[in-house]
Image: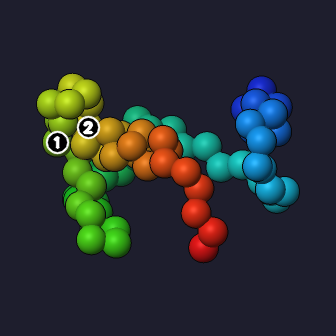
Amino acid sequence: MDSFYKMYQTAGGTTDVDGIIAVDTQALVAAMNILGDINVDGSTFTTKTDPRCNCPNVIYQMEVFADQPAQNY
């Protein structure tokens, strides 16, 4: 996380953070295989293979979300 935080600080427009949460994508997909699809804010996340990345849909959707500018909530 130290390497990530150093890159974060040089990105510009950053805010103070209390911590960093990392998600092991394999653990997420394994949990979703047990729990099923997840619906969030009108979007459905699945573990089915997404042809756009040949990876689980939830991983593709997280990558799309990560590429968007941060919003103030």
Q: Is mark 1 on a helix, strand or loop?
A: loop
Q: What element carries label 2?
A: strand
**Colour basis:** rainbow
The alpha-carbon separation of the residues under discs 2 and 1 comes to 5 Å
Q: Residue 36 appears at what percent x and percent y? A: 22, 59
Q: Residue 2's mark?
A: none
Q: Residue 42 appears at what percent x and percent y? A: 27, 71
Residue at left offset 32%, top offset 39%: 60
User: What's the amino acid at mark 1?
Assistant: Lys
Image quarter of residue 6: top right
- Residue 38 position (above or below residue 26): below
User: Could you tell whether 13 is left or right of 29 in the image?
Assistant: right
User: Could you tell whether 57 is left or right of 26 in the image?
Assistant: left
Disc 2 or 1, which lies upstream in sequence?
Answer: 1
Q: Residue 58 appears at what percent x and percent y? A: 31, 46
Within 10 Å of the Cα at label 2, are there few (<14), some (14-19), or many (20+) other Cα atoms?
some
- Residue 70 position (above or below residue 2): below
Q: Residue 16 appears at what percent x and percent y? A: 84, 56
- Residue 49 position (above or below residue 70): above
Q: Nearer the viewer, residue 16 or 24?
A: 16
Within 10 Å of the Cα at label 1, are there few (<14), some (14-19), or many (20+) other Cα atoms?
some
Residue receiving disc 2: 56
| Contact flag, marks 2 and 1 (Cβ < 8 Å) | yes
Residue receiving disc 1: 48
Q: In which quarter of the image is the C terminus?
A: bottom right
User: What's the amino acid at mark 2?
Assistant: Pro
